[in-house]
Image (cartoon, rainbow, N blue to C red):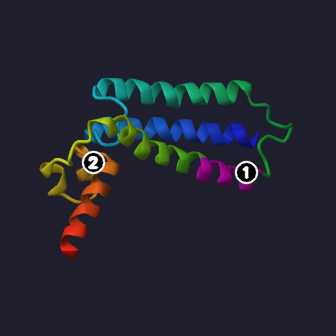
Amino acid sequence: MVWESILLMFCISLGTVQIAASWADLKGISFFKNEIAGYVFGALLVIGSFVWFFATVKFGQGGPKGQHDDQALSVVLGGGSALLITFVLPSLMRLRSFRQPSEDGLSVDGLEALKENTLFELIRYKRSSHEKGKE
């Protein structure tokens, strides 16, 4: 049951982050250019994973008792994997364009920088600006 729980947490986390990315207009971590597609994908992922999990997973007679370690592992591995995919996949999808990070996205810090830039673009910009500072 551990791998099913990890998959459930992965799908729920990925769907939730895609809904949040669409809502906050964070193009740098969204899989879709169209925000409606992000909402639909996220909702289908969350709802579908709940339906799949509770329709197919067999719980023991006592229910899911004594599985605290498994549940913690599921949250860490599933949620962590979803966050990793969320940051890496959009960066790889837009990697072909070799675009420089937009100046609008670089004037802000935190998640706001992801409105126009992917994680790889921001890392590349920070690295190049750090190297220029050493000169």
Instruction: Judge whether 49 appears above or below 105 on screen.
Output: above
Say which element carries label 1: helix
**Number of the front mark, 2 or 1:** 2
Query: Dot 2 corresponds to which residue?
Result: 114
What's the residue type where badge 1 is placed? Answer: Asp
Per the rendered image, the range of residues in magenta is 67-77
Q: How far from the left and from the top, in percent, is residue 14?
A: 48, 38
Instruction: Identify the residue at image location x=59%, y=30%.
Output: 50
| Image quadrant assignment for residue 20 | top left
What's the residue type where badge 2 is placed? Answer: Leu
Separation (CA) of disc 2 from disc 1: 33 Å
Q: Residues within 10 Å of mark 1 (few under 14, many from 20)?
A: some
Instruction: Judge whether 109 appears above or below 86 on screen.
Output: below
Residue found farthest to the right: 61
Say which element carries label 2: helix
Q: Residues within 10 Å of mark 2 (few under 14, many from 20)?
A: many
Instruction: Judge whether 109 appears above or below 61 on screen.
Output: below
Instruction: Identify the residue at image location x=64%, y=25%.
Output: 52
Instruction: Specify the label residue 70 is tagged with.
Output: 1
| Image quadrant assignment for residue 38 | top left
Q: For the C terminus, give its image quadrant.
A: bottom left
Instruction: Specify the label residue 50 is tagged with.
Output: none
Residue found farthest to the bottom: 134
Q: How far from the left and from the top, in percent, is residue 79?
A: 54, 47
Q: Is residue 20 left or right of residue 128?
A: right
Q: For the N terminus, give its image quadrant.
A: top right
Q: How far from the left and from the top, in percent, is residue 5?
A: 67, 40
Nearer-N-terminus badge (2/1): 1
Let me know if residue 85 is in the magenta part: no
